[in-house]
Amino acid sequence: MSAPINSNSFRVVENVTFSKDFNQFILQFTDLYQKLATASNAKDIALYENSEVLNGQAFFGANPQTKIQIYRKCFAVTPPTYTFAHGIVPTRITRLYGAGLTTTGRHIPLPYVSATVVTNQIELYATATDIVITLGGTAPVLTSAYIIMEYQKN
């Protein structure tokens, strides 16, 4: 009996002793292969490209057997351009995030929220055609940034 896919993740045993009986070996090997395939397929693929890539994430669909694949595209931002076309027609954005480098040498997450000054915030959002970064009145000035958009599409 196998565990549900959302249970503790499968750990690859480093030292496996297979049976010398061929039929038992086939059963053991098939079981190990299925566990490895399930564990590998459930991992997020860590490719961050400036072109669209399938990232290995899958969202629930209309029924338990249907999974919706998620794509990723990264953008390098060079201020003063804070609004730029993403060139994607997603059906739903699942994550939009990034990191920026300020003129003072600080690396900050995007969106950015200051715990002390409300006007230091940096907003990050997407429209149907663009990604928009909006600096608050006293927000740190960015010298560069990376924005990552993850999304579903038809």
Image (cartoon, rainbow, N blue to C red):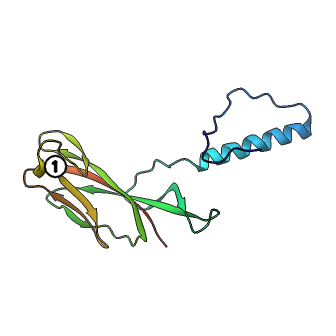
Residue 83, percent from left and from top:
21, 65
Quadrant location of residue 29? top right
Is 140 placed left or right of 124 in the picture? left
Q: Categorize mark 1 by other alpha carbons within 10 Å: few (<14), some (14-19), many (20+).
A: some
Rendered view: 16 above or below 47: above
**Tag 1 residue:** 143
How many tags in the picture?
A: 1
Q: Nearer the viewer, residue 52 or 39?
A: 39
Is 69 placed left or right of 87 in the picture? right
Whether residue 52 is visible to the viewer of this picture, yes or no, is: yes
Rendered view: 35 above or below 49: above
Q: What kind of residue is marked 1?
A: Thr
Residue 81, percent from left and from top:
17, 61
Quadrant location of residue 108? top left
**Image quadrant in which the N terminus is located:** top right
Element under disc 1: strand
Whether residue 141 is visible to the viewer of this picture, yes or no, is: no
Q: Residue at x 11, y 45 (%)?
A: 117
Is 88 placed left or right of 40 in the picture? left
Rendered view: 57 above or below 128: above
Q: Residue at x 20, y 50 (%)?
A: 144
Q: Residue at x 37, y 70 (%)?
A: 88
Residue 14, percent from left and from top:
67, 28
